[in-house]
């Protein structure tokens, strides 16, 4: 008892009536109208897949950022060191310019004959012809406006010779 319903003279199967062709005859290729089994994922599996994808992407991004940071670290370090050197050299240049200005000013003073004469009298004890000069030997005369400082008491040296030697070295280091 095969129950087949015929409409317009064509056989119908479990999948329904056969598709029509342009010739009006039966189709040479049989196509099933049944859909393939649906691949549905559970929400947990979808979230897990999404998390693993994001984690892999994040890891790749982190590696890329780290490599860029490492690639820029050495040039940045060199740049900072060079800026420090430039600053030090600029400071040194300013100091040298000040020194040159002071030396030029001193050169101008030495070009003045009265300054040269004063320096010769002061430093070299020169005297003009006909002047009498006196040289005082001994300790220099102390000015009355400065109080005399007492000489530090010499420490007493005791012990064996090497101990006394070391004590004298320590005493010589202090003034």
Image (cartoon, helix red, strand yellow):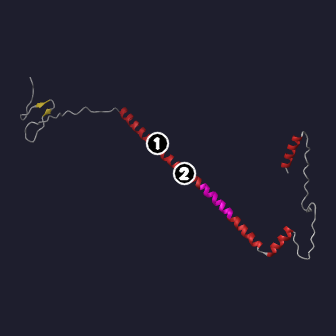
Q: Nearer the viewer, residue 2 or 168?
A: 168
Q: Position of 151 compared to 8: left or right?
A: right
Residue at 89% x, 76% y is: 129
Looking at the rendering, the stretch of residues picked out in magenta corresponds to: 83-96
Q: Position of 122 compared to 106: left or right?
A: right
| Mark 1, residue position | 63
Around disc 2, counting alpha carbons within 10 Å, would you say few (fewer than 14), some (14 to 19), or many (20 or more)? few
Q: Secondary structure at mark 1?
A: helix
Q: Position of 2 compared to 87: left or right?
A: left
Where residue 12 appears, as percent x and y from the top left, is: 11, 31
| Mark 2, residue position | 76
Find out whether the residues at labels 1 and 2 contact each other: C-beta distance under 8 Å.
no
Residue at 66% x, 63% y is: 94
Residue at 93% x, 73% y is: 132
* Snapshot quadrant of residue 141: bottom right
Where residue 11 appears, as percent x and y from the top left, is: 9, 32
């Amino acid at each position: 008892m095969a129950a087949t319903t015929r409409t317009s003279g064509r056989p119908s199967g479990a999948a329904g009536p056969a598709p029509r062709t342009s010739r009006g005859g039966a189709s040479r290729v049989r196509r099933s109208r049944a859909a393939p089994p649906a691949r549905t994922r559970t929400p947990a599996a979808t979230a897990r897949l999404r998390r693993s994808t994001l984690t892999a992407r994040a890891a790749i991004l982190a590696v890329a950022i780290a490599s860029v940071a490492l690639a820029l670290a050495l040039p940045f370090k060199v740049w900072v060191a060079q800026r420090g050197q430039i600053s030090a050299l600029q400071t040194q240049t300013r100091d040298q310019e000040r020194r040159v200005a002071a030396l030029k000013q001193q050169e101008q003073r030495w070009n003045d004959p009265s300054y040269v004469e004063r320096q010769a009298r002061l430093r070299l004890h020169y005297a003009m012809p006909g002047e009498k000069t006196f040289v005082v030997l001994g300790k220099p005369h102390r000015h009355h406006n400065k109080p005399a400082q007492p000489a530090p008491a010499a420490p007493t040296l005791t012990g064996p010779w090497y101990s006394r030697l070391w004590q004298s070295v320590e005493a010589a280091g202090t003034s």
